[in-house]
Image (cartoon, rainbow, N blue to C red):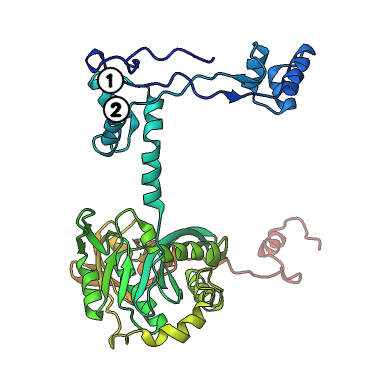
Amino acid sequence: MDKFDADPVHLHDPRVGPSDGSIVHLRPTQEDTKMLEPEVVDRIHELSARGLGTKRIARLVGVARNSVRRYLAGATVGHQERPAARRLDAATLREVRHLYGTVAEGNAVVIQQELAARGLHIVLRTLQRAVAPLRQERRAEALATVRFETPPGQQMQIDFGEKVVTIAGQPVKVYLMTAVLGYSRRLFVRAFLAQRQDDWLEGLDAAFRHFGGLTERILCDNASPLVTAHDRRTGEVVWNPGFEAFCRDRGLTAVACRPRRARTKGKIERGVGYVKHNALAGRSFASFEELQSHLSRWMAAVADQRSHGTTRERPAVRFERDERRALRPLPPRPLAVRTRRLKRRVSTDCFVDIDTVRYSVPYRHVRETVEVVVEGEHVAIYLRGACIARHPRCDEPYALVRIPAHFEGLFRRPAPAPPPPHDEGPADQVARPLAIYAELVEGGRPWAP
């Protein structure tokens, strides 16, 4: 229902002096708003006289249901005065904007509470309209991005994505280490079952070897395996020691994007989505090794050969022409894989679990706590300093790696069955039992064959 009276609480006429109360200026009315055409209004009344409801009339005429109700209630055809929206005076508006950027931190409800504590009560919707331009300004500032292009060989952007993929009929969460060269947009991706620092460094090393050289810089986010702390105000970054050593040994300059501003590395953000929705999509794989092979083929046949939407060139062509010779030489020594030492308790089925893969242990050590050493190619299991099991390292999720000797003696063999009785074969019809002869000798009844 339309209201023509202003809110009487602290919404006074501007002629009232400052000492008489808080000044919140309201315009009495806004310009007349043109209403529906007379023919449409006549049609509304005609349909109503035929007994149709407001909802059906609104649908037939093509207007809002509230408009139908208003004209049936007696609204006049042509122009009609509408109530004006409440507006703040200049002084109050300045105070609202000051609170928006300081105490309230952009929350109109907090502004309302702060003003109410000072004796100034304003409707929340009025405050929301007052700060709407400030919100739009902040939104534009946060979303507006200037595209930054880098020369050949200068920058590589890196990130991890994750996707649930069906492997051997089972849903498996796969972590995708993705890297893209800033100039050519050539892309690299490798799948892992986790995203520890070892996985980051192994993926980085594999990316550089895939591209055939090192860039000058690495642009990354603030993942904990890479960044220990990042002061948003000063921009100071504390790097994880392992990642810092990796970059120092290769002469790389690491740059972390601002916290909660992932579009700083927009090339790799788009690249991760491209991998998930193109390379993997809804595909399933028989094994983790098959997944890795598929990604290798996809990089060469699809990602490198597509026409990039920004450069309008194929990444492989752009890379070979301009970027390959701009890359720095690879380090002579391969990446040293750090040995992991983990504590595990042997389960009752004689296995220990490492990265979803289960390795067998001699059954005599069930429920004992062992030390598992994960190396590049092997997994060794120790108990009180003695190696009790050693397996080749497996990357297949949910695989069982077992040595049959670990279970020998666990199951009792059934006792051998007694030999079957000696089969004498069919009775000889010529041979007669001795009882027959005894009966004849003793004078019994003669025997008749």
The CA distance from mark 2 to mark 1 is: 9 Å
Residue at (37, 68) in percent of width and height: 158
Q: Quadrant of residue 284?
A: bottom right
Number of numbered discs overlaid on the protein picture? 2
- Compared across the picture, whether 281 is left or right of 369 comes to right
| Mark linked to residue 120 | 1
- Compared across the picture, whether 183 is left or right of 334 comes to right
Q: Position of residue 172 (x, y in %)?
A: 47, 59
Q: Position of residue 118 (x, y in %)?
A: 22, 21
Task: Specify the quadrant that holds the N terminus.
Answer: top right
Q: Position of residue 110 (x, y in %)?
A: 29, 29
Q: Residues within 10 Å of mark 1 (few under 14, many from 20)?
A: some
Which is more foreground, mark 2 or mark 1?
2
Circles 2 and 1 in contact, beta carbons < 8 Å = yes
Element marked by disc 1: loop
- Compared across the picture, whether 190 is left or right of 254 comes to right
Q: Amino acid at mark 2?
A: Thr
Residue at (53, 71) in percent of width and height: 308
Q: Which residue is mark 2?
A: 92
Can residue 387 be seen by looking at this rendering? yes
Q: Position of residue 26 (x, y in %)?
A: 39, 21
Element marked by disc 2: helix
Task: Specify the quadrant that holds the C terminus.
Answer: bottom right
Residue at (43, 66) in percent of width and height: 267
Q: Amino acid at mark 1?
A: Leu
- Compared across the picture, whether 127 is left or right of 430 comes to left
Observer-nearest of 341 and 151: 151
